[in-house]
Image: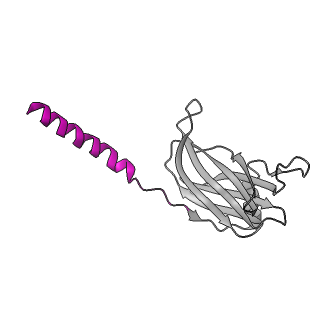
């Protein structure tokens, strides 16, 4: 009977531990309305990459960028750009991951992930804001995406600058 009781308690403890994690709410990001000057000011925090036509693997992405900035005490502004060539029919981001760490000697941990952010155009501009807890350093990693057709797709990994809250 004692073994049975311990088994039941163990199962309950596992369920209590796993269930809140499995159903944890993903922080919602909000659309961020920016002027062209404000957008460019955020992107100035990191490099805007242009891809030389001779070095492109598939020749679909012409320019790409991802940068973040701070607004107020706990708002992270995220700005990104994926520009394809004129043959591109879908562009955007395969994945955008907000990462954080406690300090410069800590490892980066994924905070929130957004997937499949596209538009049926040759260029996509991402402007979002996210309320984040203070006491961390933040950065955004992403995969820029451009598609010409089913057989012709290009993806490029990118990492933003780092912001401390």
Q: Give residue 121's position: percent from left, percent from top.
A: 75, 69
Magenta stretch mostly in which secondary structure? helix
- Vertical placement of residue 68 versus 2, above or below: below
Residue 118 seen by the camera: yes
Vertical comparison of 77 with 110: above or below: below
* Residue 165 in sight: no
Examine the image and state in which quarter residue 6 appears.
top left
Q: Is residue 12 magenta?
A: yes
135 in the magenta segment: no
Residue shown at the point (80%, 61%) measured from the top left:
84
Q: Position of residue 59 (x, y in %)?
A: 84, 55
In the picture provided, is 14 more to the left or to the right than 28?
left
* Residue range corresponding to the magenta coloring: 1-29
Q: Nearer the viewer, residue 137 or 94?
A: 94
Q: Position of residue 96 (x, y in %)?
A: 61, 53
The quadrant of the image that shows the C terminus is: top right
Q: Say which of 46 and 97 sits in front.
A: 97
Q: Residue at x 22, y 37 (%)?
A: 10
Question: Which residue shows up at 91% across the image and 49% down it?
Answer: 54
Q: Is residue 47 above or below residue 119?
A: above
Left of 164 or right of it: where is 87?
Answer: right
Position of the N terminus, as image quadrant, is: top left
Task: Decide which of 46, 70 is in the foreground and name it.
Answer: 46
């Amino acid at each position: 009977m004692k073994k049975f009781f311990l088994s039941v308690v163990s199962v309950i403890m596992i369920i209590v531990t796993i269930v809140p994690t499995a159903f944890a709410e993903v922080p919602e990001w909000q659309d961020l309305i920016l002027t062209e000057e404000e957008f460019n000011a955020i992107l100035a925090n990191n490099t805007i990459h242009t891809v030389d036509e001779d070095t492109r693997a598939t020749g679909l992405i012409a320019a790409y960028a991802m940068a973040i900035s701070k607004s107020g005490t706990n708002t992270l502004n995220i700005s990104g750009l994926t520009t394809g060539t004129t043959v591109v029919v879908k562009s955007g981001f395969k994945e955008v991951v907000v990462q954080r760490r406690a300090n410069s000697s800590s490892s980066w941990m994924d905070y929130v992930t957004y997937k499949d952010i596209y538009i049926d155009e040759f260029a996509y501009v991402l402007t979002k804001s996210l309320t984040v807890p203070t006491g961390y350093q933040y950065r955004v990693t992403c995969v820029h995406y451009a598609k010409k057709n089913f057989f012709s797709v290009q993806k490029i990994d990118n990492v933003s600058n780092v912001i401390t809250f």
